[in-house]
């Protein structure tokens, strides 16, 4: 099996390393030798063994009939989309780790793969090394999916975990994370929840077999979470986690990304640091949870190569079928019900008590000048309406 | 797709219920309608809708060419083995939840399925509703498996969890578990570790592609764990869990079932009550963990039906290939290295200090008359040798 790898960045060089290191295992599992014939990159890598197979021209790959599988690990929508589409149209299976590409064009690319009797696989696009796409597609097939909730972004989980253990502010921990390489120089995609949003769009599309537009998913990041919020969470024996969720409530599918408080009854409570976890609730199966490294060169590359093995074993047979181009419009968030943790300045207690059904008042010894509480379950719409009448310091949804 | 279900006990009636309840989802996923044509049981079920399709004679099923998939959920090796073998030889795919059958005859039955270009699938045999067999076979294919460690038995996990939260003795909690239906009247298979042993035999055989005889796996149950051991564990911020493990150490595969102390750094630490969890360590992937209901009528039945969906989609294509009849002999346990938590009577401190490198002394306020400690890492053989010279009250392996 001759393959081409598009992009020799972190994941691309990881794919090269995985195939070299686990050559024997992969050959045994795939049923034949998997060999990288080309690596596409704009750069040259003099002195690196990959130099001999570097090409700068995608058409060399597209027009080589010996290439049956293309691995796309460039990231970004352009030119990845045009390369992937051309490869599929030429009858080559594609394995990708590119969540932007899958979230935006997944339905169309899957449809081409289906027509061509080849495969478009993207295990590494969500949860890095954690098997979740294939289990959703092939294992959880006897159940209706009631809910998927994931900690899908390692950077924000690292930041929130450190804010908790160190008591530090967001900006301080972000800076440390950037120095350690856990957060990018421009951290917006992670900390504003955009990365998690694309990933939950992919999982939701797979779970319900219809295309969910990631731009229609309510998305809130973690930039407004403060050290004081964490202190309140600690007082509640809770943690604040950035949860990406889609939930089927009486046939309406809600989808959202937002920081939420969870306690130790929640299966994702102990998913800390850069780890990811994905909870799937089936109507008969109950809770199933998948946990592991959500990013990182080798775990992600390992997931890409598992797709290469699968594509090799399934030449001429399309195995991913469920994700039509029919649109699934997420339900109106204003009807979604949650409990809210709310902080208002002292002096607004009485107004708060009039506006909300208060389930619990929360106090922390060294925070004063404010009144903090958890509401009973209420809709987002009713919350927003009531919140207008208060000088809310912060509010975080509560899942217990 | 016409199928037959062998056995209308807990799992069998669950399979019937799953197929009725999620009829639409299953049809969509399988690509065709899945219909139960026969249920084999010695009993009749007057008044139950299943009565119309009950048969007492397996040959009716074996000789009906319309039946392409047989679901075996009778349990036990006989007559399950002869029914399953006959079905496979007649070209019918088989889906089973029967861990005894798979552990004992898996290699042979997989070989028949491969020759006949059909499938022998057993997702539900380990971890109930948790997808683990298919991920091991199809997702974790780019990695060499360094370790699999699972909490694979819900009954013992429930007992150990309750002993911890209630401070009760084993016998007391076992009785409660029996009353609640979480433990069987004859609990031996669970509490002596035999159930977990068969399951780790299956996972190890799949991970290394060779047959591991469950009788060669070192197996120790939880009957000797006392309320005092739990107190010591609490003092160490640890939990005692029945762990089933296989581990590749420099090419030697160790396999064992034994109660072990783990702390909150271990991914299985928060797997409590009747839940199961399975940790897989890949050489490049790192840790991946799967969590969910390890037993129960509907979760187990859901896993069986996911196999039926897979078998339906793969008529004429064998998808499980790796588990040869070549034997993998587990490495000699006497060379396996662990730390040990050890309790000896007061008066033996000096002897203990001579015999062991002591890493930590452990004391609990209300236990006296004894000296408890954790050793440095040492081989099982060296431990056994030293232990002969002491009046050991109890000893538990430690994983931190």
Image (spheres, coloured by chain):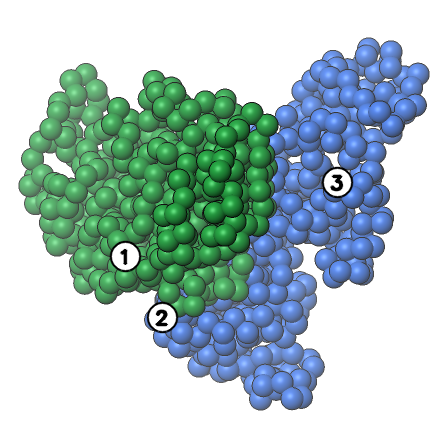
Chain colours: A blue, B green
Determine which residue is flagged by label 3: A164
Residue A193: in sight, yes or no? no
The vertical placement of A215 against A144, above or below, is below
Distance between the alpha carbons at the discs numbered 2 and 1 = 19 Å
Which of discs 2 and 1 lies nearer the camera? The answer is: 1
Query: Which of these two is toward me, A281 or B129?
Result: B129
Q: Which one is earlier in the sequence, the residue at label 2 or at label 3?
A: 2
Q: Is residue B261 left or right of residue B314?
A: right
Query: Which of these two is toward me, B147 or A16?
Result: B147
- SS of the residue at dot 3? helix
Chain at numbered mark 2: A
- Residue occupying the point 74% across, 27% down: A235
**Local crowd at mark 2 within 10 Å, few (<14), some, or many (≥20)?**
some
Query: Which of these two is toward me, B70 or B316?
Result: B70
Chain at numbered mark 3: A
| Quadrant hosting residue B64 | top left
Callouts 2 and 3 on one subunit: yes
Q: Is residue B300 left or right of residue B71?
A: right
The vertical placement of B63 against A372, above or below, is below
- Residue occupying the point 53% across, 34% down: B232
- Residue B105: x %, y % from top left: 19, 52
Determine which residue is flagged by label 1: B212
């Amino acid at each position: 099996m001759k393959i081409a790898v598009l992009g020799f960045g972190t994941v691309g060089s990881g794919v090269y390393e995985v195939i070299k290191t686990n050559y024997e295992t992969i050959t045994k599992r795939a049923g034949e030798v998997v060999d990288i014939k080309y690596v596409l990159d704009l750069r040259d890598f003099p002195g690196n063994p990959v130099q001999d197979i570097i090409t700068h021209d995608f058409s060399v790959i597209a027009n080589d009939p010996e290439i049956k599988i293309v691995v796309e690990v460039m990231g970004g929508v352009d030119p990845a989309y045009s390369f992937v589409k051309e490869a599929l149209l030429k009858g080559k299976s594609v394995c990708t780790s590119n969540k932007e590409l899958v979230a935006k064009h997944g339905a169309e690319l899957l449809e081409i793969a289906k027509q061509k009797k080849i495969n478009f696989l993207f295990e590494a696009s969500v949860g890095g090394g954690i098997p979740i796409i294939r289990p959703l597609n092939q294992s959880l097939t006897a159940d209706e999916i009631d809910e998927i909730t994931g900690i899908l972004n390692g950077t924000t989980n690292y930041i929130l975990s450190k804010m908790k253990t160190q008591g530090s502010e967001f900006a301080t921990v972000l800076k440390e994370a950037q120095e350690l390489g856990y957060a990018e120089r421009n951290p917006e995609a992670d900390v504003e929840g955009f990365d998690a949003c694309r990933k939950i769009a992919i999982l939701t599309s797979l779970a319900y077999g219809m295309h969910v537009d990631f731009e229609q998913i309510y998305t809130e990041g973690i930039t407004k979470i403060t050290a004081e919020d964490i202190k309140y969470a600690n007082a509640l024996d809770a943690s604040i986690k950035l949860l990406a969720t889609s939930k089927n409530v009486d046939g309406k599918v809600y989808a959202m990304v937002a920081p939420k408080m969870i306690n130790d009854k929640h299966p994702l409570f102990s998913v800390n640091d850069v780890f990811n976890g994905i909870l799937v609730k089936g109507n008969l199966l109950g809770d199933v949870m998948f946990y592991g490294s959500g990013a990182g060169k080798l775990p992600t590359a390992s997931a890409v190569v598992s797709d290469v093995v699968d594509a090799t074993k399934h030449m001429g047979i399309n195995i991913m079928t469920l994700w039509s181009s029919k649109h699934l419009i997420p339900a109106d968030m204003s009807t979604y019900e949650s409990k809210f943790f709310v902080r208002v300045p002292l002096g607004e207690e009485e107004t708060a008590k009039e506006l909300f059904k208060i389930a619990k008042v929360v106090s922390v010894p060294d925070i004063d000048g404010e009144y903090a509480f958890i509401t009973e379950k209420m809709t987002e719409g009713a919350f927003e309406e009531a919140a207008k009448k208060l000088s809310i310091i912060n509010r975080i949804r509560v899942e217990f």
